[in-house]
């Protein structure tokens, strides 16, 4: 029986933190968005979701679209 490589992809966010000086929390979020590229963002972990897909890879590692199964 052949063996296939199957990728399991789980939805996730990668969280980052930065310290932003502001008068209030709303302003801090707005300033963070404006200064996104200039702030020193530090990784703060990964948050995974329940949504998953499973998809078989071909011999060169490319996904075979018609094999995708959503869970």
Image: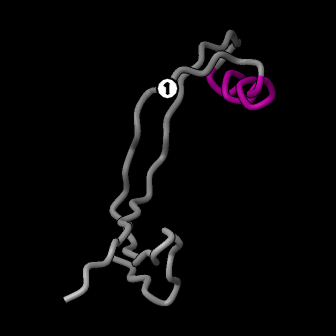
Task: State which quarter of the image contains the N terminus.
Answer: bottom left
Query: Which residue is rendered at x = 25% and y = 85% of the image?
Result: 2
Establish if 40 lies above or below 58.
above
Residue 29, percent from left and from top: 67, 28
Q: Residue furthest top?
A: 21
Task: State which quarter of the image contains the C terminus.
Answer: bottom left
Magenta stretch bounds: 25-37
**In this view of the protein, which residue sits in the foreground, 40 or 19?**
40
**Local SS, label 1:** strand
Residue 56, percent from left and from top: 40, 78
Establish if 16 lies above or below 70.
above
Mark 1 lies on residue: 43
Q: Main secondary structure of the magenta part?
A: helix
Asked whether residue 35 is drawn in magenta, I would say yes
Characterize the local packing of mark 1: few (<14), some (14-19) or many (20 or more) Cα atoms within 10 angstroms.
Answer: few
Q: Please give left or right for residue 3 compared with residue 64 in the image.
A: left
Query: Which residue is rendered at x = 74% and y = 31% of the image?
Result: 33
Query: Which residue is rendered at x = 68% and y = 9% of the image?
Result: 21
Query: Which residue is rendered at x = 53% and y = 28% of the image?
Result: 16
**In this view of the protein, which residue sits in the foreground, 71 or 54?**
54
């Amino acid at each position: 029986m052949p063996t296939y490589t199957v990728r399991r992809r789980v939805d996730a966010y990668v969280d980052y933190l930065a310290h932003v000086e502001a008068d209030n929390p709303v302003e801090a979020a707005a300033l963070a968005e404006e200064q996104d590229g200039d702030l020193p963002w530090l990784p703060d972990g990964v948050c995974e979701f329940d949504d998953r897909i499973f998809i078989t890879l071909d011999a060169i590692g490319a996904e075979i679209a018609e094999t995708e199964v959503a869970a």
